Amino acid sequence: LVEGVRRRASRPSLATGESAAGLQREWFKVGLALFLILVFMYLLTRTDLLLVGSLLGQEAVGMYGAASKLATTVSFAFFAVNAAGAPVISSLFAADDREGLHRMVRRTSRWVFWPALAIAVGLAILGRPILGLFGEEFRDAYGVMLILSGGYLATASMGLSSSLLNLTGNERLSALSFGIAVLLNLTLNLLLIPRLGIEGAALATMLSMAAWSVVAYLLARRKLGVNPFVLGGSPR
């Protein structure tokens, strides 16, 4: 991310006395985009819970919240790999090592997806009894947990697509992908919760997460020429 800003600030138009002001403007734009990303991330992961509470009541919120928290364990590898791989990806991009960047993207995609798949399978097997620890009625949220796990697994299959945009000076495109997902999430939740209950909220969130992942993947591939999909081939 820092390298992306430095590259833009070192353009010929900013190489004179305007460079300091230009760098400040670039940092402001980056900061605003990252702020929007944080806001959109919060909305993407909380809109379903807020609308479930508003439309279905507190009991539904409790069941949905338990299933949602359990499903988020599928994304554990994503955050772990992102923390470890982000500095390497940033360095490779700064060095303009395209081949090295592609290899790293391929590695991180595998490191994100296969652990996520293993956790999702484990939840499919053990999720119902785990939910039962909160109370017998929570077992009814098993379907919600499976649907949300599918959303996190879809995200994992696209590797670090959104992070790649953030790390290479394309944070505004990353914010755009999140914004699209938030609007879709809100619309689908309002449509599906009255018809399908908590399963409708889970389906709306899963589809929104999948849409965000696909948009971020397409943008990363177009802008960087890398293929973050776990089963993707060579770069273009």
Image (spheres, rainbow, N blue to C red):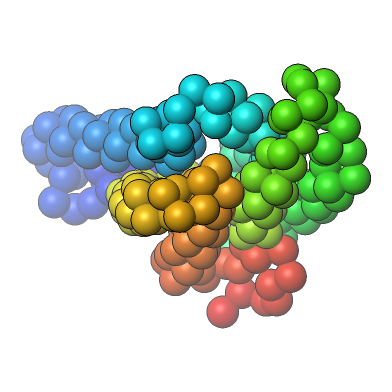
Of residues 130 and 98, the one nearer the viewer is 130
Residue extending furthest toward the left: 17
Question: Residue at position x 72%, y 39% from top?
Answer: 140
Q: Quadrant of residue 222?
A: bottom left
| 12 relative to 78 in the view: left or right | left
Residue at 61% x, 68% y is 227
Q: Which residue lies furthest to the bottom in this view?
A: 236
Whether residue 149 is situated above or below residue 133 in the rendered picture: below
**Which of these two is toward me, 146 or 122?**
146
Total numbered circles: 0
Vertical position of residue 39 compared to residue 112: above or below: above
Residue 223 image position (x, y, % from top left): 42, 66
Residue 24 on image: x %, y % = 19, 30
Q: Residue at x 37, y 56 (%)?
A: 191
* Quarter holding residue 132: top right
From the viewer's side, name the closer residue of 86 and 148: 148
Q: In this view, does 214 lie to the left or right of 82?
A: left
Measuring from the top left, give residue 189's x and y in whole percent: 41, 49
Residue 122 x/y as whole percent: 88, 43
Is residue 203 in sight in this rendering? Answer: yes
The residue depicted at 49 percent of the width and 23 percent of the height is: 58
Q: Quadrant of the C terminus?
A: bottom right
In-front residue for pair 115/165: 115
Indicate the quadrant containing the N terminus: top left, top right, bottom left or bottom right: top left
Instruction: In the rendered view, tell whether residue 77 sits above or below residue 228.
Output: above
Q: Can residue 107 be seen in this view?
A: no
